[in-house]
């Protein structure tokens, strides 16, 4: 379905008072622009962490259009918390089984990189599990890139 149709439908819902905002997830720059012409996009949600930085290419478009940004998996899908396991040790439906970051060779290098990050964090008197990553999320444009609220028990 064309994004213009989706944006038009959401616009109708906003105009009717049934929806307040229009957000997108994992959209590229052209999709964001095409949707924004029909109905202004409020926010984009995309994976963004020390391990996944492709979202940075979207920042100029988001800034130009005034679209907010919400990062998800800001802790590298478990790498930065030290809970990541190699591919094959997750449920068969888990995307990490197929993601290159968890494959043999890459997994070990990523664990080593997190160890170095931990060493750096220790020199600053902080922990690697959260604070260095959140500082990184603020760095590219100087504007906050907000991680999603943490859910209790997750």
Image: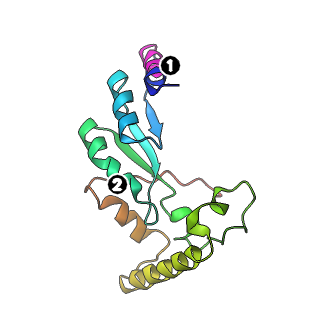
In the image, taking residue 65 as reference, residue 55 lies left or right, namely right
- From the viewer's side, name the closer residue of 89 and 136: 89
> Which residues are the magenta region?
8-16
Position of residue 52 relative to residue 113, above or below, is: above
Magenta span: helix, strand or loop, mainly?
A: helix
Marks 1 and 2: CB-CB under 8 Å?
A: no
Image mark for residue 145: none
* Residue at 45% over, 15% down: 12
| Residue located at (32% from left, 25% from top) | 37
Q: Residue 6, relative to residue 72: is it above or below?
A: above
The x, y position of residue 147, in whole percent, is 45, 54
Q: CA distance from mark 1 to mark 2?
A: 32 Å
Q: Residue furthest right?
A: 92
Residue designated by label 1? 18
Q: Tell me, yes or no, whether the highlighted magenta stretch contains residue 148.
A: no
Q: How is the image coloured?
A: rainbow
Query: Is residue 71 visible in the rendered structure shown here?
Result: yes
The numbered mark at residue 56 is: 2
Which numbered disc, 1 or 2, marks the residue that appears first in the sequence?
1
* In-front residue for pair 67/121: 67
Q: Residue 133 location, x and y as percent?
A: 42, 67
Q: Residue 2: x and y, percent?
A: 48, 25
Q: Nearer the viewer, mark 1 or mark 2?
A: 2
Can residue 42 be seen here? The reply is no
Few, some or many residues within 10 Å of mark 2 (<14, 14–19, 20+)? few
The structure residue drawn at horizontal position 68% and vertical position 56%, both measured from the top left corner, is 94
From the viewer's perspective, tell me whether residue 139 is left or right of residue 154: left
**Vertical comparison of 124 with 7: above or below:** below
- Find numbered disc 2 in the image and state the secondary structure of the residue it sits on: helix
Q: Determine crowd level at label 1: few under 14, some 14-19, many 20+ residues with C-alpha closer than 10 A.
A: few
The quadrant of the rendering that contains the C terminus is bottom right
Secondary structure of the residue carrying numbered label 1 = loop
């Amino acid at each position: 379905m064309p994004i213009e149709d989706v944006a038009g439908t959401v616009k109708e819902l906003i105009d009717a008072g049934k929806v307040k905002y229009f957000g997108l997830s994992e959209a590229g720059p052209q999709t964001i622009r095409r949707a924004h012409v029909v109905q202004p996009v409020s926010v984009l949600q995309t994976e963004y962490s020390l391990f996944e930085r492709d979202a940075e290419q979207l920042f100029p478009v988001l800034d130009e259009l005034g679209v907010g940004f919400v990062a998800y998996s800001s802790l590298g899908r478990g790498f930065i918390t030290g809970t990541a396991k190699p591919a094959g040790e997750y449920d068969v439906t888990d995307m990490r089984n197929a993601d290159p970051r968890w494959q043999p060779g890459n997994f070990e290098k990523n664990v080593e990189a997190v160890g170095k990050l931990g060493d750096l964090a220790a020199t600053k008197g902080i922990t690697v599990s959260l604070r260095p990553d959140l500082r990184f999320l603020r760095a590219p444009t100087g504007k906050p890139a907000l991680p999603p609220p943490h859910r209790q028990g997750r």
